[in-house]
Amino acid sequence: MSESLTLSHNKYISWCRNNLFSSWINGIITILSLYFIYEVSTFFLNWTIFEADFVNNFRGEKITDRTFCSKNIEPGQHGACWAIIIVRFHQFIYGFYPVEEAWRVNLVYGLLPFALVGIFFDKVPFRKYFIYFTFLFPFIGYFLLYGGAGLDIVGTSKWGGLLVTLFLGVTGILLAFPLSIVLALGRRSKMPVIKTFCIIFIEFIRGVPLITLLFTANVMLPLFLPEGVRPDNLLRALVAVTLFQSAYMAEAIRGGLQAIPRGQLEAAQSLGLTYWQSTRKIILPQALKISIPPIVNTCIGLFKDTSLVLIIGLFDLLGVGRAAVADIDWAKLHYEVYVFISLVFFIFCFGMSRYSLYLEKKLKTDNS
Amino acid sequence: MSADQVIQLEKVNKWYDDFHVLKDIDLTVVKGQKIVICGPSGSGKSTMIRCINRLEAHQQGKIVVHGTELTNDLKNIDLIRKNVGMVFQQFNLFPHLSVLDNISLAPIWVKKMPKKEAEEIAMSYLEKVKIPEQAQKFPGQLSGGQQQRVAIARSLAMNPDIMLFDEPTSALDPEMIKEVLDVMIQLANEGMTMLVVTHEMGFAKTVADQMIFMDEGKIVEQAKPDDFFNNPQSDRTKLFLSQILNH
C-alpha cells in the first residue's frame, strides 16, 4: 500500500471519528440514523425496483389489468406494479393526443433544449442563432402542437399529461418574466397612475388563490369578451397562470431593485443616460442577479401549482394520474401513480433549483 | 450674463419637507474657475452641487448652466448632464461592468459612439489617471483610490466642460487620498472648471481660485484662498477653520 493511500485512509478514519463518533451520544445517534436510512432505502428500493412488476408479473404473465399484478395475486409479498404507468405511458406524456401524431410533441420536446440553451448559458457557441431560435420557437412549437398548414389540427382539448404541465409551466414562466419586470419597475415609478395600477394589480393577484384565478379565467373571462369569442380552455388557464406568476415574480424583482444603492442610478444619470438606458444597462442587470433565488423559487412554486388546472377540467400530469387511478381495470394503484408523478415533478423542480445555484455561482465569479 | 459665466445660481432655495437646506444661494462660476466648497456636515454643500446637474431639484430661484435654465424639462436636464461631469464620495462605479465598460458605456449609449472608438477613448483616460493596466478588471477588484480614479476617468470620457466633485476623498484610506488629489490637480492645471466639495485644505490652497464656506444652508463666506485662510471675516468660518486645521 502506498504512503499517500495510507494517509488518505487515516484521514478518512479520523474524519469519521471527529464527525460521527466524537462522543457517546453522537455515536448512538449516528448508528440509529444509519439504521433508519438503511431500513427506509431498502424498503423503497425493494418496493420500486427489486420486488416490483414492470411488464410481466412474477409468473411471467403479461400484466393487462390490476388482477395480474403480483401484489394482488400474493398480497404482502411484492412491490409496486408499474404496469399501470407503462400501459398508460402515452396518456401520461401526451394526454389524448393522437398516437400517430405524437412525433410532433416529441419534436417540440426535442427542440425545447435548443430554444432554452441560448438564454440559459451565455458561453454557448453560435449563441446569437440560438437566441433567434428562442424567439421563433413559440411559433414553431404552437404550429407543431396545434397543427394547420399541412398538419392535422389537434385541439387543445386533446392535449394532456406532461404536455399540458410543461406548456403551462414553461410558457407561463417565460411570458410572466417580461411582464413582471414591467410591473416591478411600474411599482417604483414616480408616476402616480402607473404606480397605483401596478400596486393594485400585484396586490390583488397575490391576494387571491390561484384556483380562484383559474375559475375566474374559465368562467368569467368569456363574459367580458364579445359574443362568439370563446377562447380556448387551455389558453384561459395560461392567462391566469401568467398573471399569477407575474405578480409574484414582480415582487421578487422589486426586492432586487430595492437592494441597488441609489448612487448607481445617480451615477448613470449624471453621465447623461436616460431613465430607460440606466434601467436597462445598470439597474436591471444588478437587480435581476440578486433576485435569482426568489425568482426561481416562484418558478418552482408555479410549476407545481399548474397541477391545479385539473379543477377546471384540464388533464395535466396529475389529472391523467387521477384518471388512471379511477380506471376500473387499474383501480387502487394509487401509490404507483402518485410516486411516478412526484418523481416527474421532482426532476423538473430539482433541475430548476440546480440551475439557479449554477447561475448564482457563475455571476459571483464574474465580479468578485 | 457674460459669455464667461458657465454656472449661475440666483436666490436658490430648497426644502426637504420642512427642512430648509438651501437658503437664498447666489453663486456665479466663470469658465476655468476652481471653487472649493467647505463647511460642516448638513450645511447643504453637497445638495448645492447636486442641484447643478439636477440630481436634486431646487424649489425656488434660478440655476442656469451654459445658458440653459434647469427646469423640469427633461431635454434641458439631459443637455446639461452631458456637459457636467460628477464624481461621488462612494465612487458609484457599476460593479457588474469591467473598468473599460464602466468608462465606455456613456460614450456608446449617450453619444452613440462606435464601440471601438469609445474603448480607445476610455483607454486614453485610463492612461491619464495612470491605471491603464486595470482596464479588464471589475471595480470590486480595485483599491478605493483606483476606483475613484476610474470614476474620474468615466466622467471625463463624456468630455464635460464642468466637473463637480462631491467629497471625492472622504471615503478613502489616508494613503490613497494623494493619488486621487494628484489627478484632480492635473485636471485643474489643464483648465477644467471645477466645483469641489472637500475638506482637503492643502488641495484647496493649491488649486482653488475661490473658497466658499457654507453653514446651515447659506453661503457664509466667499473669498480668495489667501484671504479665506489668513483673514476670515465671520466667526463661524474662524471656528470651522480652527477645528479642521488644528487637529
Image: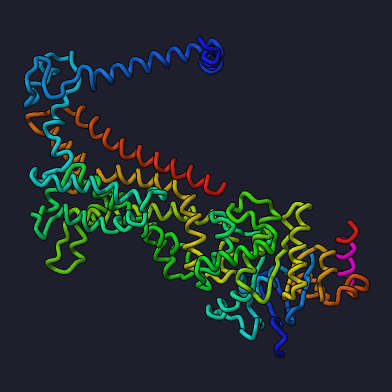
Residue A280 x, y percent position in the rendering: 47, 63
Q: Is residue B26 visible?
A: no
Between A123 and A148, the residue placed more toward the observer is: A123
Residue lying furthest right in this view?
Answer: B230
Give the x, y percent position of residue A298.
38, 47
Comparing A345 with A244, the one in front is A345
Magenta residues (range) = B235-243
User: Horizontally, is A114 left or right of B104 in the view?
Assistant: left
Answer left or right for B168 relative to A80: right
Image point (78%, 52%), residue name = B175
Residue B52 position in % (x across, y down):
66, 75
Q: Nearer the viewer, residue A29 or B79?
A: B79
Q: Is residue B62 above or below residue B229?
A: below
**Up-down: is B167 above or below B222?**
above
Q: Is residue A142 magenta?
A: no
Picture quadrant where residue B129 is located: bottom right
Q: Position of residue B18 (x, y in %)?
A: 66, 70
Q: Nearer the viewer, residue A223 or A79?
A: A79
